[in-house]
Amino acid sequence: MNSSTAVPSAPHEHTAEPSGFPAPRLLAGWHATGRPADLTDHLRRHGQPPVATALGSRTSMPLVEAVESAGLTGRGGAGFPTAHKLRAVAERGGRAVVVVNAMESEPASRKDQFLLAVAPHLVLDGAVLAATVVGADTVHVCLPRTRTAQYRQLSEALDERRRARLDPVRLRLHALPHAYVSSESTSLVRWLNGGPARPQGSPPRAHERGVARRPTLVNNAETLAHLALIARHGPDWFRERGTPHEPGTTLVTVSGAIAMPGVQEVALGTPLATMLDRPGRPTQPLRAVLLGGFAGAWLPAEHVHTPFTRRDLAPLGAAPGAGVLVALPHSVCGLSETARILAYLAAHGARQCGPCHFGLPAVADDFATLAAGRADPDLLPRLHRRTGLLPDRGACHHPDGAARLAASALSTFADDVDHHLNDGPCPAAGNRPPLIPVPPAIPPETWQ
């Protein structure tokens, strides 16, 4: 999908659920009509947004308690309990700020872009409800400035709401520099305060003193859409899907060697294999899957029956992350794919600390040498050593994700590592064009 296109073209998105799968929630309108929902469509399907202090006719439980009872966690990658974030900001007192993180700088993910394209008012409802809960008078919606069509469509959605006098708070739309780490929550706060869109590693935290030195809630776009549905239907309804420990549905971008790549809405706990088979099957025998995105991990294909939950994936060294699942066939070299990703991650580091400035580029260079099959007896020990030094030492978690990806590749593709070191590149390294679309490994032009 072109970065400036807000709604992916039809062949790359599922417009109907295969029979036998539960009906979608976030994407219900899109699956029913095949068109983006304007405000009239949205209100016809979902009704007026409920007040934030109560959940309409379903229950009188206050919203924060309902979100906590529902077990909603962040869908941006970290998986932090949403109710804890709401409560932390609300308890600070005074005027707060809400930030909608719609940056989605993970190149393998399209879920938030797609959700905002087809159901923007569900996200905006959630943001406004969150604002009234935490005592905010302003909601900032942050997008990358490269997605001009998405910006235009969201501007139209905001105009619809203003004309309808729907919201008790002010909503402002912003276009930020597009870099991999600019979607980190502290990057958004820092930019909204007039600084560069780079992560802020030192205290205070956003909920203590964020935008304009006010308590600030930063939530991913999909998380807020779930909040809007919980406010309407209640926590018991939310828990009808998913697992007892990880309830609800989530959006996942599935791509690679499958018949119909696209964005799926699945219940947490759905096996990876089911997601790969829905609605088309893998087009070739699989060697591995990339889970979580560029800061995620490779898993051997033998693990594709693992449920898609943090609890089930953690023993394998993986996590749902940014909601990304990429199918890698035997015909593609996993080391070459990883080398390209690491080069991009190294170029997009904020360069504010040693691991990002020196360590990550060194690991990326070593991996490029490995992928090229240039024999070096010290290469593998050096890679293991450098990869082990990256985590927990940076100003943000960017080096940690890169280290996780590199380490998982060395493990999952261990046979190929031996081949590349001892016999030159494996046959798959030069047989096919790259599978995963990776942006050029060029540093961002600006952070402002």
Image (spheres, rainbow, N blue to C red):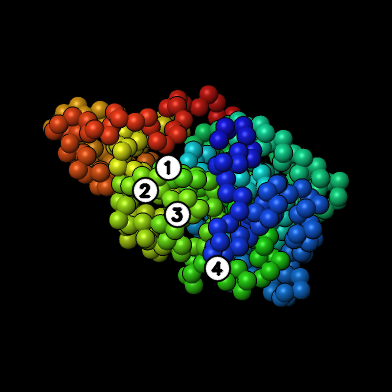
> Disc 2 and disc 1: Cα gap in Å?
9 Å
Q: Residue at x 58, y 57 (%)?
A: 17
- Secondary structure, mark 1, is strand
**Label 4, label 2: how far apart the Cα atoms are:** 25 Å
Q: Residue 86, how many percent across, how many down?
A: 62, 60
Mark 1: amino acid? Gly
Residue that carries the numbered disc 4 in the rendered image: 241
Q: Do the CB atoms of the residues marked 4 and 1 lie less than 8 Å apart?
A: no
The residues tagged by marks 1 and 3 sit, at their Cα atoms, a distance apart of: 12 Å
> Residue under circle 2?
289
Rounded to the nearest whole Å, what is the CA distance between mark 4 and mark 1? 27 Å
Label 4 or label 1, whichever comes before in sequence order:
4
The C terminus sits in image quarter: top right
Looking at marks 4 and 2 on the same chain, the residue that comes earlier in the sequence is marked by 4
Q: Earlier in the sequence, mark 1 or mark 3?
A: 1
Q: Which class describes the residues within 10 Å of circle 2: few (<14), some (14-19), or many (20+)? A: many
The quarter holding residue 440 reads top left
Q: Residue at point 17% right, 36% down?
A: 419
- Between the residue at mark 3 and the residue at mark 4, the CA separation in whole angstroms equals 20 Å
Asked if the residue at tag 1 contacts the one at tag 2, i.e. Cβ–Cβ closer than 8 Å, the answer is: yes
Residue hosting label 1: 256
- Look at the image and tell me in which quarter the N terminus lies: top right
Mark 1, Cα crowd under 10 Å, few <14 / some 14-19 / many 20+, is: many
Left or right position of 130 against 76: right
Q: Residue at x 75, y 61 (%)?
A: 46
Classify mark 4: residues with Cα within 10 Å, few (<14), some (14-19) or many (20+): some
Which tag, 2 or 1, sits closer to the chain's start? 1
Circle 3 sits on which residue?
277
Mark nearest the camera among 1 and 3 is 3
Q: Amino acid at mark 2?
A: Val
Numbered disc 3: secondary structure: loop
**123 shown above or below 232:** above
